[in-house]
Amino acid sequence: MNCFRFLFCLPLFFFSAARAQVNQIVEGQTLVSASLLADTTALTPGKPFEVGLLLEMAPGWHTYWEYPGDAGLPTTIAWTLPEGFGAGPIQWPLPRRILEPGDIEVYAYKDKVLLITTILPPADLKEQSVTLRARAAWLVCEEICIPGSAPLELTLPVGGAAAAANSELFSTFRNQLPSAQPPPSPIAWKQKGSSLALTVSGLTEAKSVDVFPLPAKGQEVNHPKDGPVTDGTATVEIETTGDLRGVLTVETATGRKGWFVSSAVSPSSALPAPSSPLPSPPSTTLWTALLYGFLGGLILNLMPCVLPVISLKIFGFIRQAGEDPRKILGHGLAFVAGIFAWFLGLGLLIVALKLAGSEVTWAFQFQNPWFNLAIASLVFVFALNLFGVFEIVLPGQASNALAEASSGEGYAGSFAQGIFATLLATPCTAPFLGTALGFAFSQASYVILAMFASVAFGMGLPYLLLSAQPGWMKILPKPGAWMERMKQFMGFPLLATLLWLLYILGNQKGLEAVIWVGGFLLCLALACWIYGAFCGPLSSLRTRAISLLLIVLIVGWGAVYFLGEKFTTSQRNSAAATAEKSGGIDWQPFSQKALDALLAEGKPVFLDFTADWCISCKFNERTAIDVPAVRAAFQKNGIVPLKADWTNANPEITAALKKFGRVGVPFYVIYPAGRPTEPITLPEILTEQIVLDALARSGS
């Protein structure tokens, strides 16, 4: 394929796809015939089965592998499944290397290919038959490239006598799937300058050896250079940057076999296939996801980390009792505007990071210790303000102007409270919110923004209704001197929030880091006291100037010494992190390799996705998981508890969450013994009985 032909594909996309919805026909010739086939005549509730997308290409034409090479696009399948069904990713058979004029190298399929997907039906399926629908899209090339797509469907009866179907076709292409097990022949990787050399030995009957690269996003890979098989040994050189993952193929007289290999993994270790048949969560429609986002936003108001700020807002309603209803409504609108500003700002940041190629998730900012440090400082200063250590005092003219515009006084404060409430709400995913966000993060930018707006509307609606109908305030106590004491009392919930943030920092950076943060907060406290004592309206200009200079010096020195020198170099003590827990669950650290090994041995696994900054996670652990009855069930049934600690950013945990369509914690999965493709997911908020019932349902 030359460069002109590849560029020619792009303007043809909209025209060709539109005229090839069912059959891709060009000048009377069918280029691609697409159909869905199942490996069974009937499906059994709760039992996985396989469906294949069969693409039959006209002579001379080809479609592409999951990594197409120098040009091309891989085939995609967008499933629309009945409620409760899950679909795994495409399992890709071994491709062929095609060399085109202009030194263009692609990895593709000719004649026909079966792309297999594992489908998991729900265990409580009651219908007599189900219809699976999908839209397949592909790029087919010869001298020119033409995109094509087709809506496809497959209807299967439920229950009854299920027999194997399309056995020969499925068997042929299953045999062409790469294996995640180590290759039977010894392999060795060696760095040669900017190239990696893979040497395969012990090849007694091999005719040829090849490597099809699977580079990471943004990784540059040149054409693999195959060496001949000499005395049972062959070497393939690939010019690339960093470690490389790919598929090693060995061709003998009886056909080709393939194995996933990686220069970053021991040759003797099994390598998880990127096309692992783990089912994805059930399909979710946009309107359902938006409804879930709205409900999740409502429930966020009940999250423990938000309650201190919510209590401040309720206190503000008490202070406003008896005031002009229009002013009360204005404060409510400002508070809700703050909620929308934070959520939409976060949504825009996520969209920008996704467009830049970054992996982003819900509450990703709390994985950064510097973000948590900034929030801890803000919460501490806010608490000092409530205790009366300092007040924000404006110059005389500005103060008079605000007094005259009484209807607008304090609106900025209400707006800031709205931002503050949502800022503290984002560490955890409330019920409904996990499903909604998992759907949105995999969609287009406008869907992500619509989802965040839906969550903001759900969280802000109660305050909007209360401020629009202030009649309910008649039942509240009248404003008076008691309110000053109440304002001071409200500072203590904020100090409790500060303790939570310090706990997070301790788990991220270690105990020493908490000490150094405490030193910086002491500097902040002194600076706030100086401001409150010497920067009042009765202080002279000279006193205020000296005080402000002293504040800058104290805070600046504290930031340089406690944060720049001490906090930055603090490290979490791994020995302390794995210290013995008296009477608790013996959690094993999660890794995909450890999980795959346990499932391969047929062991039952309880997988806990958690983070120290997630209060819901800690609540669930202490009230529903690490309790005597559940610990006894784990021990009795030999369940292995794995903890995926997401406190700090961890790409492997992020990838594992995304396999289930999730982008936040808490999240819980039970893998029954001997049934690794039938995972059971639990809700975000747990009770002890929910966990025990799930364990019983898993047969563990």
Image: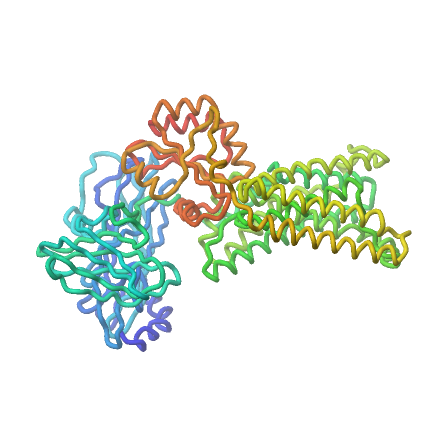
* Residue 579 image point, x, y percent: 47, 32
Left or right placement of residue 136 versus residue 652 in this view: left
Image side of residue 496 versus residue 352, left or right: right
Q: Which of 281/489 is in front?
A: 489
Can you give x and y, in whole percent of width and height, for residue 515 in the image?
A: 62, 41
Please, is residue 623 above or below residue 328 in the view?
A: above
Nearest the camera: 81 or 220?
Answer: 220
Q: Quadrant of the C terminus?
A: top left
Q: Quadrant of the N terminus?
A: bottom left
The x and y percentages for residue 18 are: 35, 66
Instruction: Please state the horizontal and vertical placement of residue 442, each as a whole percent of the image.
Output: 44, 53
- Specify whether residue 468 is in view: no
Q: Nearer the viewer, residue 283 or 687?
A: 687
In the visual, does 582 lie left or right of 489?
left
Which colouring convention does the figure follow?
Answer: rainbow
Please say if 16 is above or below 642. Answer: below
What residue lies at 89% left-to-right and 53% top-to-bottom?
A: 539
Report whether residue 213 is seen. Answer: yes
Residue under the point 86% across and 53% down: 403
Taking the image as shown, residue 202 lies to the left or right of residue 18, namely left
Name the residue nearer the viewer: 260 or 472. Answer: 260
For residue 248, above or below residue 156:
below
Tell how many labels: 0
